[in-house]
């Protein structure tokens, strides 16, 4: 987790970052160096509708500024990263799976109305990538890619400091890169086959493990599940750490699949660095299993990428965890203010 | 081919574009609207070394300006697109397969010296993409991708008007996107397996056809080859047009492979448009077979891309042919002049 700093340490101007997800809204007050003075979450309460949520986000922004010991006049910008898809120039959501019933809501302007301040609008994956780029593992690079491994696979791409938003504000959709073009390739959540997300998301890992167990593979997972533990990548990680061969095979298989997808990203945009973030990193940089997972991804990339890209592209873990979104939203607002 | 205009029609300022390849150097004098006043080629004569070629390029630039009826003072910029890899900011070539023995030569500054004018340096794939973006099939888009299908597969990517050069000036290497991750995937020229170039370049098409014939597949190609015709994608196109089922299968198989690769590009950068250029387009837009090939690519893209990208991304032929390189080099010089 990103360390908090005191008001005395902080360097003005200040920014508020908002990370709007399907379950919760994270907010942070951030200084000009991307350091957090204060952060908290409020529930999204999707069902109450977007106007109610906009109102509560406006109130939360004011509460955050006050609790950080600041005046509104000290805030140079408010950034809002939302689950997409959206129309960024228009400030509107589109048909959003994560925010059901919020379609076509003019989110940017309504939040701005309730804040009493202009709001810079972006998508959550692009915001998280910008957070890592500004103050996380991507700091030393001009170009970087963040893959967020969770229920699905999100992707944000920065090219020479420019956040790739793409046509229709859809941003990078690298979760849907084809890694297997065979006729029997796995089905993705999007209804197409062979996509990265169908092999290396939490959903995919659970499904692939379930199929192996149903197919009669011996594993310590079976006993855990019989004792009532829910099958998840976390359980797979736990059993892999305890020496279960099937669980380890699943972890390293996930690494290989990711490696294939990352190579296609590298060959398209010659990114300097690919970061892995999100909940499904098998423990991440702090765990031996996480590091083994990362080494597996790196090995597959070296095996498949053309030499000079294989040698020079860093593959690493993201470092900001759940803070990347609001930090990146704040950073996007800051970048926008500096451009003007 | 791009139409020539007269001096009277032309709108100043003027630019010279140079497209340096392993065999020949194409030059063009271009007006502010990207229309060509004059163009010609000189041999590269790689073996005489880069200093000699730089000198001859300098002479050719002066000859072109003179033959176009212009003074040097009317030229606002000279752009040089070269086969890579290279160090664009440094103006140097790197270890170049297409220009053997030219490694680490300070090409930009030596050509500038012999021209007596500053030279804007870029790579040939990026230049060709910029040409299509400026005055070719990519004109109406803000973001586009050009795949050049030839011996290998080149790629140039424009994102919101910005030409993607990437870390170490390698630009897009989408020819090396993995389209088949299976253990028995085809070997690419780069020594790795499963890359797009191993399935959809001219080299690959010839190899795949040869294997089918060697495997005993009946085809009218056999008789053509027995009569001394060299097996090539052009011959495959000819026989496909004449109704040979194997040849048609190869053409449509190439389209499917390309579709898989294009989907990974689309999902990474949300490009508005993907253009197919180069020598191996099975006749391109002017031939029924070429249009069938394009329809095959489009169908595979629709089958594999997430809905909104599948619907909104244009897949089409490039329109500038061999002129794309010098036009794009001239356009890159123009863009650079306008930024300053």
Image (spheres, coloured by chain):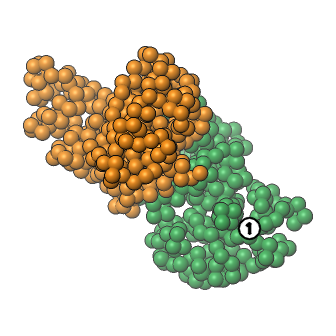
Chain colours: A orange, B green
Q: Residues within 10 Å of mark 1 (few under 14, many from 20)?
A: many
The x, y position of residue A140, in whole percent, is 37, 59
Q: Residue, x 26% and y 43% (percent of image)?
A: A1
Left or right for A123, reference B17: left
Q: Is B8 drawn above or below residue A212 in the view shown?
A: below
Q: Is B175 drawn above or below residue B54 in the view shown?
A: above
Can see residue B194? no
Q: Residue, x 39% and y 30% (percent of image)?
A: A25
Left or right for B60, reference A279: right
The x, y position of residue A9, in whole percent, is 33, 53
Which chain is indicated by disc 1?
B
The quarter of the rendered structure image containing the C terminus of chain B is bottom right
Instruction: Identify which residue, A313 or A20, lies in the foreground.
Output: A20
Instruction: Identify which residue, B308 or B136, lies in the foreground.
Output: B308
Location of residue B70 (image quadrant): bottom right
Name the residue that disc number 1 marks.
B15
Instruction: Identify which residue, A192 or A10, lies in the foreground.
Output: A10
Left or right for A8, reference A108: left
The quarter of the rendered structure image containing the N terminus of chain B is bottom right
Q: Is B104 drawn above or below residue A326 in the view shown?
A: below
Instruction: Identify which residue, A61 or A310, lies in the foreground.
Output: A61
The x, y position of residue A220, in whole percent, is 10, 29
The x, y position of residue B231, in whole percent, is 55, 53
SS for dot 1: strand
Residue lying at the far right of the rendered structure: B8
Q: Residue, x 69% and y 62% (percent of image)?
A: B338
Can see residue A311? yes
């Amino acid at each position: 987790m990103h360390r908090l700093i005191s008001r005395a340490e902080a360097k003005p101007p200040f920014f508020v970052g908002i990370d709007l997800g399907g379950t919760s809204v994270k907010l942070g007050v951030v200084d000009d160096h991307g350091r957090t003075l204060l952060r908290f979450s409020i529930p999204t309460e999707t069902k109450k509708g977007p106007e109610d949520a906009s109102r509560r986000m406006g109130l939360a922004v004011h509460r955050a500024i006050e609790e950080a010991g600041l005046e509104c006049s000290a805030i140079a910008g408010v950034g809002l990263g939302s689950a997409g898809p959206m129309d960024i120039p228009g400030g509107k959501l589109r048909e959003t799976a994560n925010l059901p019933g919020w379609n076509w809501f003019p989110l940017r302007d309504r939040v701005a109305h309730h804040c009493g301040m202009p709001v810079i609008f972006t998508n959550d994956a692009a915001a998280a990538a910008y957070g890592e780029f500004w103050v996380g593992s991507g700091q030393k690079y001009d170009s970087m890619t963040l893959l967020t491994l969770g229920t699905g696979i999100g992707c944000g791409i920065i090219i020479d400091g420019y956040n790739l938003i793409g046509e229709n504000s859809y941003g990078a959709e690298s979760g849907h890169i084809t890694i297997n073009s065979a006729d029997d390739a796995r089905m993705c959540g999007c209804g197409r086959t062979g996509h990265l997300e169908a092999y290396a998301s939490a959903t995919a890992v659970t499904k692939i493990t379930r199929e192996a167990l149903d197919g009669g593979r011996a594993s310590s997972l079976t006993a855990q599940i019989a004792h009532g533990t829910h099958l998840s990548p976390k359980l797979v990680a736990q059993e892999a750490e305890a020496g279960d061969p099937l669980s380890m095979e699943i972890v390293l298989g996930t690494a290989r699949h990711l490696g294939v997808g990352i190579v296609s990203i590298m060959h398209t945009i010659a990114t300097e660095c690919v970061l892995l973030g999100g909940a499904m990193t098998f423990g991440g940089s702090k765990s031996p299993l996480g590091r083994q997972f990362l080494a597996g991804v790196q090995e597959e990339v070296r095996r498949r990428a053309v030499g000079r890209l294989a040698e020079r592209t860093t593959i690493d873990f993201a470092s900001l965890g759940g803070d990347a979104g609001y930090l990146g939203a704040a950073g996007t607002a800051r970048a926008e203010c500096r451009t003007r």
